[in-house]
């Protein structure tokens, strides 16, 4: 049994996850012995950061990137391993193993994404009480504004955690108002505060960006819209 598992783990596409899980295990080991930062993959802004934006679009808003990637690769690897053991190893694929393997990679990530997001969100409340996870990892999270403190700052709570506290930065002409639902889009480390946008505006912007990307993709492939 063990030999079959090892053999399956070293077959494409599962070997990709085996390699990634080894890197992730090494990273967490370095974190434990304090040789690597816990926020290695965190960023200060969602703008022009493809990984952060992708994680938010996959449902990992407000989840530490390191944790999201760890669970995503773990579950996707388990799905890929199951497919290898139950199906692929019994087939004579030959050169077809590469395209089939790429399809399995896509399926594994697609199926694992909502599962990993659900697990991460179930741990979210406990994580946000842990100081290293109380900063950049909240990018993409939705908050409800409680009150304006002054002309520079407002206070808010995470939409799913009424007992939480988040400090919002006010911009000229766009200061958070009590009761508004807003999305955190940038972390200001010097101030310990976030810049935010109204939730509906954020959603509308994402729709426009996705349409623009699709439009550019069509043109790059030689199609017109």
Image: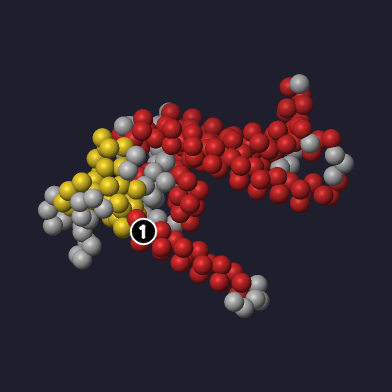
Q: What element does badge 1 sit on?
A: helix
Total count of labels: 1
Report the residue marked by disc 1.
200
Q: Which residue is depicted at the point 71% across and 42% down? A: 13
Residue projecting furthest to the front: 179
Q: Is residue 200 above or below residue 105?
A: below
Q: In this view, does 225 lie above or below 92?
A: below
- As drawn, is 196 to the left or to the right of 173? right
Q: Which residue is depicted at the point 76% across and 21% down? A: 1
The percent coordinates of residue 135 (x first, y second) are 32, 43
Residue projecting furthest to the bottom: 224
- Residue 20 lies in what quarter of the image? top right
Q: In this view, does 2 lie above or below 169?
A: above
- As drawn, is 67 to the left or to the right of 99? left
The percent coordinates of residue 202 (x first, y second) are 37, 59
Q: Is residue 21 visible?
A: no
> How does the figure colour the protein chain or chains?
secondary structure
The percent coordinates of residue 91 (x first, y second) are 85, 39
Q: Which residue is depicted at the point 32% across and 43% down? A: 159
Q: Quadrant of the C terminus?
A: bottom right
Q: Which residue is depicted at the point 87% across and 41% down? A: 92
Between 37 and 94, the residue placed more toward the observer is: 94
Residue projecting furthest to the top: 1
Label 1 Cα neighbours within 10 Å, binned few <14 / some 14-19 / many ≥20: few
Q: Can residue 74 be seen in this view?
A: yes
Q: Is residue 184 above or below residue 68?
A: below
Between 210 and 67, the residue placed more toward the observer is: 210
The percent coordinates of residue 84 (x first, y second) are 75, 36
């Amino acid at each position: 049994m063990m030999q079959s598992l090892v053999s399956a783990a070293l077959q494409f596409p599962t070997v990709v996850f085996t390699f990634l899980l080894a890197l992730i295990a090494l990273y967490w080991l370095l974190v434990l012995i304090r040789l690597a930062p816990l926020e290695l993959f965190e960023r200060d802004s969602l703008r022009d950061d493809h990984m952060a934006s992708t994680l938010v679009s996959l449902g990992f808003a407000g989840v530490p990137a390191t944790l999201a990637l760890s669970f995503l690769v773990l579950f996707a690897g388990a799905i890929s391993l199951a497919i290898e053991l139950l199906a692929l190893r019994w087939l004579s694929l030959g050169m077809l193993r590469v395209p089939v393997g790429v399809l399995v990679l896509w399926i594994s990530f697609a199926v694992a994404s909502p599962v990993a997001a659900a697990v991460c969100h179930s741990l979210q409340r406990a994580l946000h009480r842990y100081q290293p996870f109380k900063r950049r990892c909240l990018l993409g999270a939705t908050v409800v504004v409680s009150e304006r403190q002054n002309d520079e700052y407002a206070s808010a709570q995470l939409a799913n955690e009424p007992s939480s506290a988040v400090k919002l930065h006010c911009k000229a002409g766009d200061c958070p108002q009590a009761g508004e639902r807003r999305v955190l889009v940038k972390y200001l480390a010097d101030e310990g505060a976030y810049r935010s946008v109204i939730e509906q505006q954020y959603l509308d912007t994402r729709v426009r960006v996705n349409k623009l990307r699709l439009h550019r993709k069509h043109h790059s492939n030689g199609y017109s819209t």
